[in-house]
Every structure is written in C-alpha cells, then in structure tokens.
Amino acid sequence: MSRYKISDLEKLSGVKAHTIRMWEKRYDMPTPFRTDTNIRYYDDLELRKFLNVVSLKNAGNKISKIVKLSDHEFNSQISNLLQTGTLEIKEEILINQLISSGLTYDEFGFEKAFSNSILSFGLLGAYKRVLYPMLVKIGLLWTISELSVSQEHFVTSLIRQKILTAIDAIKPSSDCLEKWVLFLPEGEIHDIGLLIASYALRKRGHKVTYLGKNVNLEDLYEVSKNVNATHYLSFVVRHNQRDVVNKYLSTMNSKFNSSTCYVCCDSSFKDDFNLFDNQNIISNFDEFLNLIQ
C-alpha cells in the first residue's frame, strides 16, 4: 500500500493543501493516517475517494452534501456524470479514475476507465484529453516525490498494450505516398507518444518504420540506407538532451537531407536545438495531427 502526502493530493487534484486541511477539519474527508512522528499521510483508498469527491465538486455539487452521500449514491453520481456530464467533467473523472487505479495497481479499474475514454473520445482523442494529461500529473509526482517507479511501469505498460493492440488492427496500405521513420534518440525511453504517432500515421495510410526507443546514430543511418523515407519523427522529453539531439540533427542533415525531420517536444525546448532547413519542431498534439492530414 502506497502512502501519499498532502502535497501529492494537491498536485493530483488541483485542490490547495489548506483547502484539503479545511475539509478534513469540517467533514473528516479525506481521512489522514499518522506516522509515529505524527506526520499525516493517505492510503490508496483515501486517494481514490478524494479524487472522485473533487470531480463531483467540480461538477457543481457542494462538498457538504457530497460527504453525506452513501457509497451507492456516491458511485451512482460518478457514473451519471460519465454519461451526462460536460466533456470537461468526463475528462476529469476519467483522468482521476486512471490515476487512482494506476497508482493502486488496479488493472480492472484501469481497463474500465481506459475503455470509457476510448468510447467517449476515440483513441487519438483519448490520448489528447485523458491519457496525456494523466501521464503529466503522475510524472510530476515521480519527479518530486517518493512514489514507486513500479507504479509508472504498471501504468505505461497497460497503455502501451492498448496502443499496440490498436496498431495491430490497422491493415497496411498498399499505396503509401509517405514513408515515415519513427525513433527516439539515445537516452530517450518514454515511447508512448511515439506509439500514438505510429497509430495516427498508419490510420491515415502512411508507411511507418518503427524503431522505438534509445536508437543510436549508427543504426539510424543504417535504416536510412534501406528505407527511402520521406519523413523522420522523434520525441524529446528530457531537458538534458540538447547536445545529443543536436548531434542527431546535424548528422541527419548531412546523411539524408532529402527527407523532412520533425522533433516533438515541449515548446520550452525550442531554442535548444540547431535546426536545418528541412527540420521542424512540433510542440503539441494538434499540430502533429494537422501536419499528417
């Protein structure tokens, strides 16, 4: 069982720590445990319930009424919001359900929330509206707190399985005008964005050669000699990858400059890279989808 600090709840929910303390005092929700040194923490069940309470409150319900609901009434209201709530409320509930089930290793709960996300928005829409925001929230916690790396592996493994299944269901096009090579440079290991890009490209009938993560320059050059690619696509997540990526960009420009190269990264990275004429930055998912259409 994991232990969550009040700062973890704040970052996952958007509710300020002082508000959480006020709710504890007035409504006994969430209910903290205490360490031997009297430091408050919350367990998996309290995290799950708290995130759902926040979703109900953000949908317009008063916290004083939410805490009086029975378990049946509580769960019923969450289910109703998934059916009748605004897109923003649906997104928030699904994000919170994925977070709580992912951090508690609840595969059944994660599967249910994931399926609801796909039914509501489709795979590409679910990635933009639900999966990516969820990964950003959890990723922030892994960076600054003591949450287990195994939680990250559990969540990302389930998402990867779903995306790979969706890719396998796409029949390859026999008439491909564009040929894309997808890869992550050395040191980059988070490939969910790359997998989603692969799905989107294949869905639109493009040819994809998927190399995956941590690809070195020698292997990339070998591929270029055998695949007449029109486009190369890479993702950069880590802030300390400037020198590595610039080396790739320089080599790609000299070795296969007849192709167009795209680097997907946060907009704050933009000034870090030395781009050549055939190289471009993509800083958000909508920009990528507009490009491939």
Image (cartoon, grey):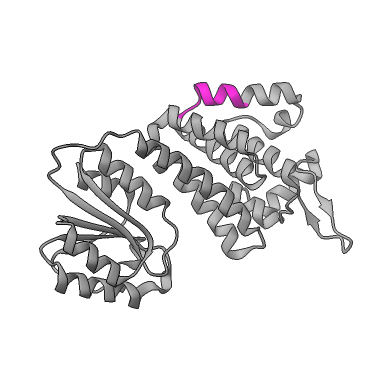
Nearer the observer, 8 or 289? 289
Q: Residue at 10% x, 63% y: name it.
A: 258
| Numbered disc total | 0
Left or right: 198 as drawn, with respect to 229: right
Read off the magenta span: 78-86
Q: Quadrant of the C terminus?
A: top left
Nearer the observer, 292 or 171? 171
Q: Residue at 13% x, 38% y: name it.
A: 175
Left or right: 170 as drawn, with respect to 24: left
Q: What secondary structure characterizes most of the magenta part? A: helix
Residue 194: where, in percent of width, then height?
Answer: 36, 52
Q: Residue at 42% x, 74% y: name it.
A: 240
Q: Is residue 81 magenta?
A: yes
Residue 184: where, in percent of width, then height?
Answer: 35, 62
Whether residue 195 is situated above or below residue 220 in the rendered picture:
above
Residue 257: where, in percent of width, then height?
Answer: 12, 67
Nearer the observer, 143 or 229? 229
The residue furthest left is 258
Q: In which image quadrant can residue 96 be found?
A: top right
Q: Residue at 28% x, 75% y: name it.
A: 246
Q: Is residue 257 magenta?
A: no
